[in-house]
Image (cartoon, grey):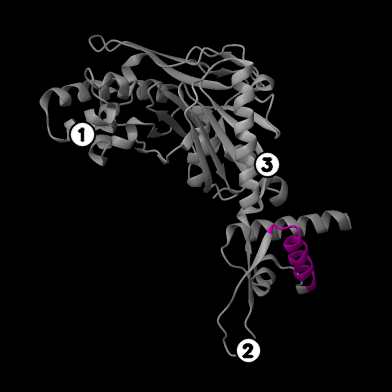
Amino acid sequence: MRAMPSTAVKAHNRSAMTQYLYGHSHVTKQELERELGLSLPTITQNLRALEDDGLIRKGELQDSTGGRKAQNYEFNPDHRTAIGVVMRSNELRLCAINLYGNVIEKRNDALPYRNTNVYYQRIGGIINNFAADVEKKHGKVLGVSFAIQGILSPDATTITFGTIMGNTGLTLETISQSVHYPCMMIHDSDASAMAELWFDSTLTDAVCVYLERRPGGAVIVGGKLYQGPNQMQWRHRTYDAGTGRSRMLLRPCAAAWTPTCSPETLPEDYESIPGFFSVLEQGERHHRERMDEWLDYVAQAIVNARSIIAGDVIVGGEAAQHLEDSDIEDLKARVIARSPFGTDHFNLRKSYCAEDQNIIGAALRFAENYLDDICGAAVRG
């Protein structure tokens, strides 16, 4: 067997040490020697280089066991940062994350969406100022990722169907025309699923259902976000409660489900979604009936999705934040009752449900790519 070139060995050692430091809070030279099988001179040399590059920093000294206190080293998560952005009808929301996926800065601007160059130039200025503030306090910004409500082209550079925001045909080049950083687009449901994967490394196969005002979904296969060659998304299309007939569309991301699965169908006139759930908790009968009907629609959508992609189910989005454990159990029972397989075995649980989850997930695309480069393999928090 041919020996690895010296440059390849050095790169391998550096990546192995970076990956180990990323996954452990505090590490000593002795621990690296024991766990990675590297010599102390090699470890010392790499630690010095990693510290000079800002990837790691010295931590506190370990407690003395009678001899010299050992120096701890730790990964510097603020070495690089990434920004996620979502453009909504009445506001612009931004989040900056570090390399552990933690939110380090936020900004919300009451800025009505307009599909015009003036709007994109204005948000470019806002994003650049936000990024500059982030870099003053933290590390260099890797890039800006936009969470998009709409169908994206296979190369994720064009919105091919954007009825929600009225921006069909909009390109990444237009959106990012005034942004001074690398940019990308990702569908908002896929972005939310990215956050699920990041914060739960045990996920393997799952259908993610996001019960937003414009509900959507994403698919996780083999512990990775599955988009297929055409930015695949699934959407519940129609369901008749009387006949039980329904149709699931599996295609490049459609604009929205029919209103039946949207939490907007729950409140009565002049009632908010949080207001509906507040009254529901008080046991009001009519609200309970509306909730039961809505859960039936959601259950059927899940059954349809699982008939194509069997796996566990993660329920997230705005509505999920109001669901109790009993509601999740109830929803699973409704799914099983409608399943053609009868006693189907799967897990159904609430989503990570972080505030601005889709924005965080969008930014994680840049963080993940960077970590792949410096660690030599995918690393999740």
- The amino acid pointed to by label 2 is Gly
Q: Can you identify the residue that label 3 sits on? A: 142
Task: Say whether residue 182 is magenta.
Answer: no
Mark identifier at residue 67: 2
- The amino acid pointed to by label 1 is Ser
Earlier in the chain: of badge 1 and badge 2, it is 2
Relative to residue 49, is residue 337 drawn left or right? left
Q: Residue at x 41, y 21 (%)?
A: 214
Q: Residues within 10 Å of mark 2 (few under 14, many from 20)?
A: few
Magenta stretch prevailing secondary structure: helix
Q: Position of residue 47 (x, y in %)?
A: 73, 66
Q: Is residue 113 visible?
A: yes
Q: Residue at x 48, y 24 (%)?
A: 88
Gap in Å between the C-alphas at discs 3 and 2? 42 Å
Query: Residues in magenta?
Result: 41-55
Tell me if label 3 and label 2 are in contact, CB under 8 Å.
Answer: no
